[in-house]
Amino acid sequence: MPYEPGQVIKTLGTGNSFNVQSCYKGGMGVVYIAERQKDKKLYALKTIRDDKIKDEIKRENFIKRFRWESQVWIVLGKHRNIVQAYWFDFTYNYEPLLVMEYVEGHPNYGNTLKDWLLNKSLDLKTILNFSIQALTGLIYAQKVIKEELNMPFVHRDLKPANLLITKDGTVKVTDFGLVKAFGILESGICGTPLYMPPEQWNGKEIEEKTDIYALGCVIYEMIERRPPWGLTKNEIRKRHFSKRPKPLEKVPIALNHIIIKCLEKDPHQRQSFSELREELQRLHKRLTGKRVNVKDYPEPLSSEELNQRGSGFDQLGFHKKAITCYNKAIAINPKDARFFLNRGNSYFCLFQYDKVIKNYHEAINLSPKLPEPYIALGNVYSKKGQYEEAIQNYNRAEEFNPEVAEIYLARGNACANLKQYERAIKDYKKAIDLNPDFAEAYMGLANVYVCLKDYKQAEKYYDTAIKKNPQYAQAYIALAKLYHLMGQDEKIDKYLKRATDIDPNIGEEYGHDSIS
């Protein structure tokens, strides 16, 4: 169920806690406005609505799309006309979470263009200014996606609700959930009917000109305070295909021509982003004597933002990109232990263990009482089969903070490998006491009971691990192996298929968590 105001959202990947202040529920997703306990700063947290997605296959597909959206958003970095995504994470309930910039709107008009249109009439200068700013964000996004991912960019869902406006009038494009930047094949029609051109209704190939049409509808709506088409879905569809909007009486002829060109039925007759922005800039200069000041390049990231960006790439599996971020963060601030810890985690995922150990020791030198580097160093020794050395590091971590569940999971794993099963069970249960939703701890308990040949207990804890995290591919694999041991081979294929549906690369290693 969605979190309610007053509740706390805790993240698995970066160990953050957010106090929920408000939430905005959509059909399949929810956005929380929440204060991070660490810095008392407001963030927008986007995640899925588990209460609305009961089918596991649909849930998996939605999570995949959510991860793609997160990748696009994090790649975009920081630009004044794009809502900034800081990092990707998971909640303690294993829901994917995108941590984003909170945009504080105008106290009287709200923080979206939709709100502004409900509360205020816009003059022509403001309409042109907002349109030029939105186009600047789109031009920047198009450039970055091409450079970073070598793919075309189409937003696919431009509308007043997806244009946020700060209290000082800066426009920020948001909601990249339907971005066509990965060649993803989707069934059905994606978009918002009031702003969709004919090719989008028909499910045909879409491109930059698709967004131009939507933006033409938005410009029209800013002028008239209503969309150019009808209100029922059938009426809207018919008019998108066959009607032209009537010329607007209260705007210059030049702007009428611009809008009509945006709304051409044939996408090849519409402008590009750059062409439309230049047309609007010329009109703005004619009316005001100057052009709108725009910036087509990103803003510099702070060391903290680079660390967060690296954490996001790590959680999404792009470890080399993460290392680049941590390198830049360290160049700005070489005294923050977290940056070395996180870079070590990235190297761990790339199996570069000499670099892993070096970075963890750097983190310990900078913050000798921070438990996470000791946990991470212990995990390296565990990886090498040096379990006694690993346990020594986990013990050090416990000395500095005995309330970290990950310590007991890691030490339980090491004890299990030493066949110290009673000690392992004690540690796993301690981890569960600290975090009752800790699927990995239930998995550890199950593994121990397999070793003790108590298969019923093992089955119970594997089932619990899967209930806590339905996306836990390794738990399905383990349960399939257990059923083989129990002589229930008829159940094996079901669980193996679930595992490979979730993660086709189930055999690959998994890494550590980041701190931001």
Image (spheres, rainbow, N blue to C red):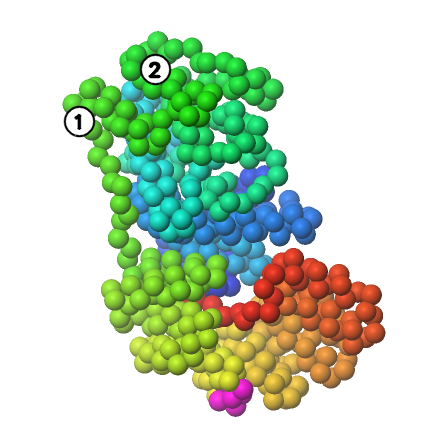
Whether pointer 2 and pointer 1 mark residues with C-beta atoms closer than 8 Å, the reply is no
Report the amino acid beneath label 1. Answer: Lys
The residue sitting at the left extreme is 289
Q: Is residue 387 magenta?
A: yes
Q: Which residue is mark 1?
A: 290
Residue at 27% from the left image edge and 72% from the top image edge: 335
Q: Which residue is mark 2?
A: 256
Q: Is residue 65 magenta?
A: no
Regarding mark 2 in the picture, which secondary structure is present there?
Answer: helix
- Left or right, 289 with reference to 467: left
- Residue 146 on image: x %, y %: 38, 46
Give, as a single range, the part of the protein colored magenta.
385-390
Q: Is residue 439 visible?
A: no
- Residue 31 on image: x %, y %: 50, 45
Residue at 26% from the left image edge and 28% from the top image edge: 278
- Residue 498 on image: x %, y %: 69, 59
